[in-house]
Image: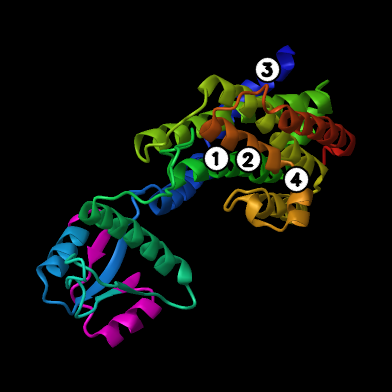
């Protein structure tokens, strides 16, 4: 054990003297953090850019437009031109929708109350935005109707907030970014470093000592685990301070779950690096191992968007229980006790990958 700890200590010192390794370990994952944080970390209030054409001269119509654009939901675009040009801009994605108030909008009806029908235009190829705007405006007009008629509708909908209320898109994306950071550290880092040590003769010199392959594997796992913990901690600090990451679970539970998860991923890096004769072999094997994890484990988009048959298959990919577990801890406040199936699958992969690593490891 003393030899393992000494090896891990010396390799850690060596790592921090390598600027390229430092960049790809600490800076490279942060690039993805800032990219996705910039996309999903902004203001999460729903806001629509709309072109409004008020063809009515009624005071009610003017006040309706004024009240509508004074809130945070609708931003009026004043340079949209004619209705036809606004429709063209909406087709190009420059506008969310076009609202038209007809000439009779706000005119009194038989009950001497303001009335009218608001027209909401939407792109037929992308109906979701128009339907959402129409739903919001229906809710606004329903409130106005209640104020005018002083009668409540006989049926209504009650909205009940869940425990996940207030979470932003970034809060859900952050778990995938953490998983990607662990993956890149464990596989891309180790898979290239070990073959490089074989080529420069470092492992040949270690082999001349009583140091066994199992000790080398454990020592490498220890020092890379320490470096990985620092990288993940840096991502968490920046996620909390810059992008206001909202942690719903316990940091202790997150740490307890992350340790075996990272140990498992390190096993794949050790397996690829230890079994490869040179860096060319490791580059090919790294892509074969890492790419399915990156794109099928929910790193960049959730697995529930996949077909059911593909979800059933990807659930057993090594990174899938890691991403799912981190996401449930951070957004649903789950504990390691709740994540028994995910931890069981991770433990199974740990046993399998380290047995293969020891079996297939080669010094040269």
Res 320 quadrant in image:
top right
- Residue extent of the magenta highlight: 70-98
Q: Residue at x 75, y 45 (%)?
A: 317
Q: Say which of marks 1 and 3 sits in front.
A: 1
Judging from the image, what secondary structure is the residue with disc 1 in?
Answer: helix
Looking at the image, which residue sits at the far right? 359
Q: CA distance from mark 1 to mark 3?
A: 31 Å
Quadrant the C terminus occupies:
top right
Res 104 quadrant in image:
bottom left
Q: Residue at x 38, y 74 (%)?
A: 93
On residue 175, the disc is 1
Are the residues tagged 1 and 3 within 8 Å (C-beta)? no
Q: CA distance from mark 2 to mark 3?
A: 30 Å
- Asked whether residue 278 appears in the rendered view, the answer is no
Describe residue 150's horizontal placement relative to residue 215 as left or right: left
Res 348 quadrant in image:
top right
Residue that mark 4 sits on? 317
Residue 89 is inside the magenta segment: yes
Are the residues tagged 1 and 2 within 8 Å (C-beta)? yes
Residue that mark 2 sits on? 323
Residue situated in front as seen by the camera: 316 or 230? 316
Judging from the image, what secondary structure is the residue with disc 2 in?
Answer: helix
Q: CA distance from mark 4 to mark 3?
A: 31 Å
Tell me which numbered mark, 4 or 1, is placed earlier along the sequence: 1
Other residues around mark 4 within 10 Å, as few (<14) / some (14–19) / many (≥20): some
Question: Could you tell me residue 248's position as x and y percent?
Answer: 48, 29
Tell me which numbered mark, 4 or 2, is placed earlier along the sequence: 4
Residue that mark 3 sits on? 5
Judging from the image, what secondary structure is the residue with disc 4 in?
Answer: loop
Judging from the image, what secondary structure is the residue with disc 3 in?
Answer: helix
Looking at the image, which residue sits at the far top? 2
Describe residue 43's horizontal placement relative to residue 278 as left or right: left
């Amino acid at each position: 054990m003393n030899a393992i700890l000494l090896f891990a200590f010396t390799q850690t010192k060596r790592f921090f003297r390598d600027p390229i390794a430092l960049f790809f370990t600490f800076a490279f994952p942060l690039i993805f953090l800032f990219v996705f944080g910039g996309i999903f970390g902004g203001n999460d209030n729903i806001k629509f850019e709309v072109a409004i054409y008020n063809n009515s001269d009624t005071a009610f119509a003017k006040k309706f437009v004024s009240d509508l654009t004074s809130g945070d939901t609708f931003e009026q675009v004043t340079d949209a031109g004619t209705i036809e040009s606004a429709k063209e801009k909406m087709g190009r994605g420059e506008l969310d929708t076009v609202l038209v108030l007809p000439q009779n909008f706000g005119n009194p009806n038989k009950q001497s109350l303001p009335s009218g029908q608001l027209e909401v235009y939407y792109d037929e190829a992308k109906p979701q935005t128009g339907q959402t705007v129409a739903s919001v405006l229906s809710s606004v007009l329903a409130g106005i109707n209640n104020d005018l008629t002083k009668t409540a509708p006989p049926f209504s909908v009650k909205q009940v907030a869940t425990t996940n209320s207030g979470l932003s898109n970034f809060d859900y994306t952050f778990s995938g970014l953490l998983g990607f950071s662990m993956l890149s550290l464990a596989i891309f880092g180790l898979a290239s470093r070990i073959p490089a040590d074989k080529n420069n003769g470092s492992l040949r010199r270690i082999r001349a000592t009583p140091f066994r392959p199992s000790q080398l594997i454990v020592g490498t796992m220890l020092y890379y685990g320490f470096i990985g913990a620092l990288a993940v901690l840096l991502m968490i600090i920046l996620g909390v301070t810059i992008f206001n990451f909202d942690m719903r679970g316990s940091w202790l539970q997150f740490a307890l779950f992350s340790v075996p998860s990272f140990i498992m991923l390190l096993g794949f890096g050790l397996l690829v690096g230890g079994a490869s004769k040179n860096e060319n072999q490791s580059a090919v094997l790294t892509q074969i191992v890492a790419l399915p994890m990156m794109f099928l484990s929910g790193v960049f988009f959730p697995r529930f968007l996949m077909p059911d048959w593909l979800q059933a298959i990807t659930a057993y990919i090594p990174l899938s229980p890691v991403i799912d577990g981190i996401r449930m801890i951070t957004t649903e406040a789950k504990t390691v006790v709740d994540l028994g199936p995910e931890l069981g699958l991770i433990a199974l992969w740990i046993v399998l990958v380290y047995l293969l690593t020891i079996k297939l490891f080669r010094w040269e």
